[in-house]
């Protein structure tokens, strides 16, 4: 058994707006460790099944890395502070302006439920076939291309070599 903690650091770059928030979801978007851990766990499960193809083994390994109702995870997550501001409720994306770096068309595809089409006057556009020029956020999100870092500290444990 290893007697010292190991630290892993991973830097992520989002390709779409991040819709993740705490209690004030309409006003402020933020990276949440629980959300990041949930995404990592989801993708770990997808890969683990391909490796073991045994549900019992997948559950055992998942509990060892991410914890379970019986034991805390030996991996502690820490979010390194990042500089990006949340895009607030009501923020407006220009659909036809690729120079500004905003991916309005991508948000149209991705954003069902977090944005609505509006016309130039800012009125909600409900007419079928009408030409929208902007999207307005209906809740806060973090912009695409956001870069953030998570430090994972693996506490000394019997299976530390398997985890890292």
Image (spheres, helix red, strand yellow):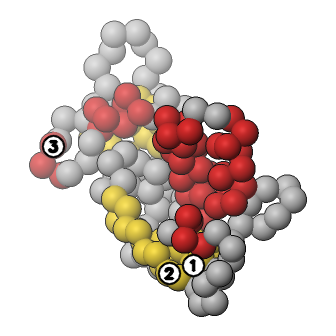
- Asked which secondary structure carries label 2, the reply is strand
Residue, x 71% and y 67% (percent of image)? 73
Residue 96 position by quadrant: top left
Specify the farthest residue to the left.
Answer: 99
Q: Is residue 32 visible?
A: no
Name the residue carrying label 2.
7
Q: Nearer the viewer, mark 2 or mark 3?
A: 2
Depicted 102 relative to depicted 5: above or below? above
**Quadrant where the N terminus is found in the figure:** bottom right
User: Mark 3 = which residue?
Assistant: 98
Count residues near mark 1 (Cα–Cα under 10 Å), then give few for <14, some for 14-19, many for 20+. Answer: some
Q: Is residue 100 visible from the viewing direction of this image?
A: yes
Could you tell me how far apart the alpha carbons at marks 2 and 3 are, in whole angstroms? Answer: 40 Å
14 left or right of 39 in image: left
Q: Upstream in the sequence, badge 2 or badge 3?
A: 2
CB under 8 Å between discs 2 and 1: yes
Q: Which residue is mark 1?
A: 153
Please, what secondary structure does the residue beneath circle 1 have? strand
Distance from label 3 to label 1 (Cα)?
A: 40 Å
Q: Position of residue 149 (x, y in %)?
A: 42, 71
Is 79 above or below relative to 140?
Answer: below
Neighbour tally class for label 3: few under 14, some 14-19, many 20 plus, Cα within 10 Å: few
Q: Earlier in the sequence, mark 3 or mark 1?
A: 3
Indicate which disc, 2 or 1, sits on the residue closer to the N terminus: 2
Query: Residue at the right extreme?
Result: 70
The tag on residue 53 is none
Residue visible at 54% across and 48% down in the picture: 44
Residue at (66, 52) in percent of width and height = 62
Mark 3 or mark 1, whichever is nearer to me:
1
């Amino acid at each position: 058994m290893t007697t010292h903690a190991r630290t892993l650091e991973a830097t992520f770059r989002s390709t779409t707006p991040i819709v993740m928030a705490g209690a004030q979801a309409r006003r402020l978007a933020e990276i949440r460790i629980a959300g990041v851990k949930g995404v990592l766990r989801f993708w770990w499960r997808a890969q683990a099944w391909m490796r073991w193809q045994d549900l019992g083994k997948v559950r055992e390994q998942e509990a060892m890395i991410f914890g379970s109702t019986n034991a805390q995870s030996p991996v502690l997550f820490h979010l390194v502070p990042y500089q990006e501001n949340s895009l607030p409720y009501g923020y407006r994306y220009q659909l036809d302006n690729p120079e500004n770096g905003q991916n309005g068309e991508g948000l149209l595809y991705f954003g069902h439920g977090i944005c609505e089409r509006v016309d130039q006057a800012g009125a909600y556009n409900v007419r079928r076939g009408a030409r929208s020029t902007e999207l307005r956020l209906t809740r806060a999100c973090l912009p695409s291309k956001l870069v953030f870092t998570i430090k994972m500290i693996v506490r000394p444990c019997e299976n530390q070599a398997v985890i890292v």
